[in-house]
């Protein structure tokens, strides 16, 4: 079995993106696309990450690369293969970069050995896909060890970190020291915020590019209210008459069908369609603090409202790049079991089917559209695509004032930010205030959509990508 998995990327027509954005930016984007097409004639833009499904990077790549492909650029996506020891290590690095202790393991010579062995195997195979003059974008710590072998091909190599913390601490510094030798020779670095880059990183090679969402993907595309309710009742998230399997438009334009149900843990029936639903959708990761949301809801929100809570995340099966998932889900289930019966009937834990990426996305889309309030109570957050996703659907949001979340939400204008992510009372107070004032909640949601349209859609991302590539490939076209 090979190490590297090549992921098919469907071209996405740029015209629909042009139709959505303000005219001034349209001309700028058209120009950037034309120059990009000329620049990348005969070159490949190879993206490498560690998973084809789940999490922010896998969410973003299909749209970004799809638009590049439609413009005639050979944009490719490959996924490295790892083993459980490697993914335990990269999860440790992920937690430490976020300033958290994680599994408490070491980052010493034997970890370097585990890391290098996996990188070597994947690197050997990637060398057959990359040529001199190509551009390689390596995403996150799981790919940092590929900088050196891929540079040797004569390609330009960019290392992009989607994670980071504003406040470095000994944990994060130790993790960056581990990665330092691997990323030292990259031609450029991309971080979501400048403060995430370690202090020793060469600022001349640093580019700050926040992520974006694609408004036309199954995750974010418009859905009519009846489509939302059909998807949610069929998948078992809402209590209403089950219908035939609902149809939806896939990323490649073909018609898909929701065939699978969510695994929902609940006492009694799912919430009624008219019940206000507070929702958090995240990977089962401790730093997303699903259990904090549950505690705040049970202790403060449930007694003061008639709302229900839905915590939804992906199914946790198989070997993935996120080995903590099943542990965190198990903890949530245990905590749910300790809630008094009356509260348990109002808290629903859902694992969404992941076998079909588009089916998963359309269920997430429908849940976000149905929610009365969406939360992102992360303790640390690199960016938090779920925030832009919910705002794009005009959902009122309550979220922690940390990392990239604070870039997306302007407090009391496009959502509510809670200063201390550990403060359950303040978090619950923000939720209760919006549940009690639907007009204010709607106002925040509408402002949130406008902010996302302006700053966090694919067009802005493509423009910044164009700037990065013109710095790497000067206009004389020499590689
Ligand atoms: N997501 C999903 N299904 C799930 C849970 C999450 O598709 O069951 C998606 C979510 O909609 C978002 C991405 O995974 O697009 C998570 O990205 P984010 O930046 O919020 O956090 P990350 O997982 O990268 O830390």
Image (spheres, rainbow, N blue to C red):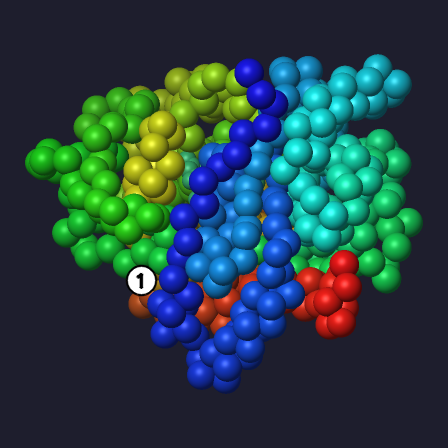
Across and down, in percent, residue 156 comes to 75, 51
Which quadrant is the N terminus positioned in? top right
Q: Residue at 29% of width from left, 46% of height from top?
A: 250
Q: Nearer the viewer, residue 477 or 425?
A: 477
Across and down, in percent, residue 400 comes to 57, 50
Looking at the picture, does residue 4 appear above or below residue 369? above
Q: Residue at 45% of width from left, 83% of height from top?
A: 23
Horizontal relation, residue 269 to residue 30: left or right: left
**Among all residues in the image, which is located at the extreme bottom?**
24
Horizontal relation, residue 12 to residue 145: left or right: left
Horizontal relation, residue 91 to residue 115: left or right: left
Q: Residue at 18% of width from left, 49% of height from top?
A: 227
**Among all residues in the image, which is located at the extreme front?**
42
**Number of other residues with Cα within 10 Å of mark 1, as a class: few under 14, some 14 to 19, many 20 or more:** some
Q: Which residue is under mark 1?
A: 438
- Picture mark count: 1
Across and down, in percent, residue 234 comes to 17, 35
Which element type, helix, strand or loop, lies under badge 1? helix
Q: Nearer the viewer, residue 197 or 139?
A: 139
Horizontal relation, residue 240 to residue 365: left or right: left
The residue carrying mark 1 has its beta carbon less than 8 Å from ligand 1: no
Please indicate, yes or no, whether residue 54 appears anywhere in the rendered image.
no
Q: Nearer the viewer, residue 287 or 155?
A: 155
Looking at the picture, does residue 308 appear above or below residue 464? above
Q: Nearer the viewer, residue 136 or 349?
A: 136
State which quadrant residue 50 falls in.
top right
Please indicate, yes or no, whether residue 230 appears anywhere in the rendered image.
yes
Which quadrant is the C terminus positioned in? bottom right
Q: Residue at 36% of width from left, 58% of height from top?
A: 216
């Amino acid at each position: 079995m090979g190490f590297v998995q090549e992921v098919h990327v469907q071209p996405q027509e740029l015209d629909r993106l042009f139709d959505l954005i303000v005219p001034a930016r349209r001309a700028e984007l058209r120009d950037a696309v034309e120059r990009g097409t000329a620049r990348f004639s005969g070159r490949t833009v190879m993206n490498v990450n560690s998973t084809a499904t789940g999490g922010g990077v896998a969410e973003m790549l299909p749209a970004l690369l799809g638009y590049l492909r439609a413009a005639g650029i050979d944009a490719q996506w490959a996924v490295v293969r790892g083993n459980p020891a490697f993914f335990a290590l990269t999860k440790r690095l992920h937690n430490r970069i976020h300033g958290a202790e994680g599994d408490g393991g070491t980052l010493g010579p034997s970890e370097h050995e585990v890391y290098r062995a996996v990188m070597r195997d994947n690197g050997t195979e990637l060398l057959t896909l990359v040529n001199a003059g190509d551009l390689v974008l390596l995403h996150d710590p799981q790919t940092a060890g590929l900088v050196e072998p891929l540079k040797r091909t004569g390609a330009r190599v960019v290392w992009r970190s989607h994670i980071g913390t504003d406040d470095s601490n000994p944990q994060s510094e130790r993790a960056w020291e581990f990665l330092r030798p691997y990323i030292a020779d990259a031609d450029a670095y991309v971080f979501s915020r400048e403060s995430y880059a370690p202090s020793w990183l060469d600022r001349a090679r640093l580019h700050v590019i926040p992520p974006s969402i694609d408004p036309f993907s199954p995750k974010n595309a418009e859905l009519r209210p009846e489509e939302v309710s059909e998807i949610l009742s069929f998948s078992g998230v809402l209590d209403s008459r089950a219908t035939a399997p609902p149809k939806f438009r896939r990323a490649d334009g073909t018609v898909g069908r929701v065939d699978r149900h969510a695994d929902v843990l609940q006492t009694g029936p799912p919430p009624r369609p008219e019940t206000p639903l507070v929702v958090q959708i995240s990977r089962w990761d401790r730093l997303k603090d699903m259990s904090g949301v549950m505690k705040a809801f049970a202790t403060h929100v449930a007694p003061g409202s008639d709302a229900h809570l839905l915590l939804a995340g992906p199914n946790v099966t198989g070997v993935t790049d996120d080995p903590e998932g099943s542990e965190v889900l198990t903890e949530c289930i245990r905590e749910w079991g300790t809630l008094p019966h009356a509260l348990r009937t109002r808290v629903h834990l859902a694992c969404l089917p992941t076998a079909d990426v588009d089916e998963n996305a359309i269920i997430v889309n429908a849940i976000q559209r149905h929610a009365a309030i969406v939360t992102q109570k992360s303790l640390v957050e690199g960016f938090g695509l779920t925030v832009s996703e919910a705002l794009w659907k005009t959902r009122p949001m309550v979220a922690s004032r940390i990392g990239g979340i604070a870039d997306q939400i302007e407090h009391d204008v496009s959502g509510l930010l809670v200063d201390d992510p550990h403060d359950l009372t303040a978090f619950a107070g923000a939720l209760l205030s919006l549940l009690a004032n639907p007009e204010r909640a709607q106002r925040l949601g509408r402002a949130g959509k406008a902010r996302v349209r302006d700053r966090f859609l694919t067009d802005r991302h493509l423009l910044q990508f164009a700037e990065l590539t013109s710095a790497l490939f000067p206009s004389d076209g020499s590689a």
